[in-house]
Amino acid sequence: LTAAVFTNFSSAFQNRQVSEISFYVLYMLLITLCLTAFRVAAQGLEENLDALVDFMRVLCPSYFLAVAFASGSVTSLFFYNVILVLIYVVELVLVRFLLPVINVYIMIQVLGNLTGEDFLSEFAQLLQKLVSWILKSLLAGVVGINVVQGLLAPVIDSLRKSALTRTAEGLPWIGNAVGGAAEIVLGTAVLIKNGIGMAGAVIAVLICAVPVIQMLVLAFLYKLAAALVQPVSDKRITGCISSVSEGYELLLKVVFTAGVLFLLTIAIVAASTT
């Protein structure tokens, strides 16, 4: 609003450079505030993603041990490797690559609005599309791998369990008792496995819920601020605030995708090994 005063009433000054200098000073102050707030939000998001990755590392041994008892070693070994690769991908791609790319995107956007000329918009759009493409590719790739192996690996283990159960039931005198005990043990293992998976999914949702809500609120507030100042302020001010809102939307997509990747993997493991 203060910048709008200098812009709209610049005719009151004999030298227009006075209003321009005042506007640039205020715009640099706005850039500093926006980038500082965004950096703090990005650091908090990185900490939440690290917490999610650490939790999955802790969950994996107990969860896939239960999967091995409930479904078999082939299923457990495969999905355990998938989770390890997924953890590595989240750390390397989302945290170490995409978050810095989003920071560069925000800097390009706010600096591009400084001159009022359309110099850097195409490069900013390229970065935005790059982030979206990578997130969609990760989601599609992980879902595809999990679904395909979720159809194949449990079949191998089910054949092994069926052969073992039938062999046990074929024993004279004690076959039926052994077969019934085996069914009870397998049913209990499935129940324990599903319980661990459900608890892990709930905790993962809770870890992701806080940053998701924060990014939603911040993106909305910056959009609201841009809408409120647009009628009275310079378009460069509006563009700067709106671009920061788009940056928070990208952060929201990153943390949402990370949570969905782990949740889908847990759900597919539970569904394919029941």
Image (cartoon, rainbow, N blue to C red):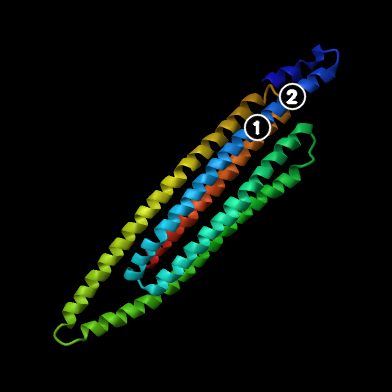
Q: How far apart are the two marked residues, 2 and 1, measured between alpha carbons?
A: 16 Å
Q: Secondary structure at mark 2?
A: helix
Specify which label sits upstream in the sequence, 2 or 1.
2
Determine the residue located farthest toward the bottom in the rendered image. Answer: 172
Residue 130 at x, y percent in the picture:
66, 52
Q: Residue at x 30, y 79 (%)?
A: 162
Quadrant that contains the C terminus: bottom left
Residue 100 at x, y percent in the picture:
64, 47
The kind of residue tagged 1 is Ile
| Residue indicated by mark 2 | 25
| Residue indicated by mark 1 | 241
Q: Residue at x 41, y 64 (%)?
A: 269
Q: Is residue 177 above or below residue 233?
A: below
Q: Residue at x 75, y 18 (%)?
A: 6
Mark 2 vs mark 1: give the one in front. Answer: 2
Q: Is residue 72 above or below residue 99?
A: below
Q: In which image quadrant can residue 136 be found?
A: bottom right
Residue 145 at x, y percent in the picture:
51, 67
Q: In which image quadrant can residue 41 be found?
A: top right
- Circles 2 and 1: CB atoms closer than 8 Å: no
The kind of residue tagged 2 is Val
Q: Secondary structure at mark 1?
A: helix
Q: Is residue 174 above or below residue 245?
A: below
Quadrant that contains the N terminus: top right
Q: Residue at x 47, y 51 (%)?
A: 52
Determine the residue located farthest toward the left in the rendered image. Answer: 173
